[in-house]
Each structure stands twice: as C-alpha cells, then as structure tokens.
Image (cartoon, rainbow, N blue to C red):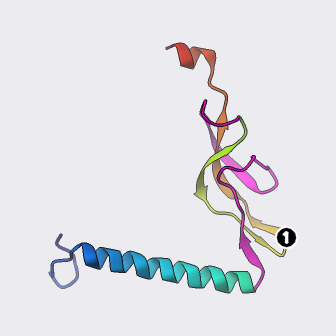
Amino acid sequence: VAAAMGGQEVGPAAHASLLEGVGATERTLTDALERFGIHRIPALGMRFDPKAHEAMREVEDATHPAGTVIDVMEDGFTLHDRLLRPARVSVAKVPSAAGASG
C-alpha cells in the first residue's frame, strides 16, 4: 500500500503500529478525563434512557427488545453525574407487520 509518507511503501505492520498508537492515545486521554470526573455514558446494549441518550434513529430489529440501544454513533459524557453531552444512538423497535411480510 503506497502512502503519502514520503512515497514509502507502508505495510500491515505500520498500520498495526498506527492503530496501537491511536489506542494508547485514547486510553491516556480517557484516563486523564476520568481523573477530573468526566466519564463516558454506557449505552450499547442498555435500555434507552432519554436523560442520557439521544435517539438519532429507530431500527426495526427482531433480535433485540424494543427500546434497546443497538448502535452508538457518538459517545456521551457526564461531569460529576451532570450531563455534558448525551450519547447519540440507534434504538431497536418492533418490526412492523407490513415490513415483515414484504
């Protein structure tokens, strides 16, 4: 894979190294935020909570109970139990009879 890094060839090892660096940066930033009381709102697989989640769309899904968060588009955060930003999520809903038949 050719990259814009001085015209050098970049292989899978370089990609893995980059992903590892991004992951380490994310962990460091998350740890720093948590020291100051900023926490990520748990959302995936949770029951939709309008006080912590912002529903961006509803998805017909027979594999999850209605009202369950099935996708997180953007993480939400709290500061000492006060909402900074709600998590933007997709929520499961019961499939319609018309959608199931055709």
Residue plotted at (84% across, 69% down): 82
| Amino acid type shown at disc 1 | Asp
On screen, residue 78 versus residue 6, left or right, reads: right
How many numbered marks appear? 1
SS for dot 1: loop
Q: How many C-alpha atoms fall within 10 Å of the one at disc 1: few (<14), some, or many (≥20)? A: few
Question: What span is in magenta?
Answer: 36-65
* Image location (x, y in percent) of residue 9: 15, 78
Please give the name of the residue rendered at 57% of the width and 80% of the height, measured from the top-left corner.
27
Residue on which disc 1 sits: 81
Determine whether, in the image, residue 38 is placed left or right of residue 90: right
- Indicate left or right for 46 with 13 as reference: right
Magenta segment, prevailing SS (helix, strand or loop): loop
48 in the magenta segment: yes
What residue lies at 49% left-to-right and 14% top-to-bottom?
A: 102
Q: Residue furthest right?
A: 81
Q: Nearer the viewer, residue 64 or 4?
A: 64
Q: Nearer the viewer, residue 73 or 20?
A: 20
Asked where in the image residue 31 lies, by quadrant, the reply is bottom right
User: Looking at the image, is 49 positioned above or below residue 28?
Assistant: above
Q: Is residue 47 above or below residue 86?
A: above
Would residue 39 be counted in the magenta stretch? yes
Quarter of the figure with the N terminus: bottom left
